[in-house]
Amino acid sequence: MRIVTIGRGNIGGGLGKLWRAAGHDVTELGREGGDASGAEAVLLAVPSAAVDDALTKVQGLGQAPIIDATNVVAAPRPEGFDSIAAYVRSRTGAPVAKAFNANFARIYDRIPEAREKPSMVFAADDDARDVTAALITDAGYEPIYAGDLANARAVEDFLGVIFAIAGQRGPFFYRIY
């Protein structure tokens, strides 16, 4: 699959490495933007305050599913939107999923050490669900579908629970049965 990451930091760069190892063709775009033409999936992995700028600097997004991995940390959600993912859909018109925001990028290299495959909770538009589940699997996680994009806010808010636990234990994997 041809994947474009918008952001090549811990999340974008880390997933790029995992997806290349799984056989995907990955192009990583940085702050300068670039062309996403021909992408079969797009990962948006930038700080929440940079979403507008990042989307403006990328041409050729088309209708490829966009996986929104941003978190509401440094900037509030855009006014009038329940989730960043809903805002991304409004800006692009593409199908969107919310994923990779509630797992620690700095321990991606430890996924093979997990006793069981760690879980990744995600919400997605119908046209983004299968691609997102496949890319979650190819990154080494088990996809846990939380429903359509109306549930993206819950996935974004799940980060609060993750950070509360990590504050006591450090970065960790979780498993949902």
Image (cartoon, rainbow, N blue to C red):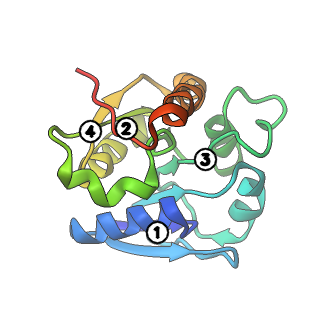
Q: Position of residue 7 (x, y in %)?
A: 58, 66
Alpha carbon of mark 3 to alpha carbon of mark 2: how far? Answer: 17 Å
Secondary element under disc 4, as helix, strand or loop, is loop
Please give the residue where the numbered disc 3 appears in the rendered image: 70
In this view, the mark in front (3 or 2): 3
Question: Percent position (x, y) of residue 45?
Answer: 57, 57
Q: Residues within 10 Å of mark 4 (few under 14, many from 20)?
A: some
Q: Amino acid at mark 2?
A: Arg
Q: Quadrant of residue 138?
A: bottom left
Q: Which mark is residue 118?
A: 4
Q: What residue is pinned by disc 2?
A: 129
Upstream in the sequence, badge 3 or badge 1? 1
- Residue 150 occupies quadrant: top right
The answer to whether residue 13 is above or below residue 118 is below
Disc 3 marks a residue whose amino acid type is Thr
Q: CA distance from mark 3 to mark 1?
A: 14 Å
Specify the farthest residue to the right: 79
What residue type is disc 4 on?
Pro
First in sequence: mark 1 or mark 2? 1
Residue under pointer 1: 13
Judge the density around disc 1: few (<14), some (14-19), many (≥20) Cα neighbours within 10 Å. many
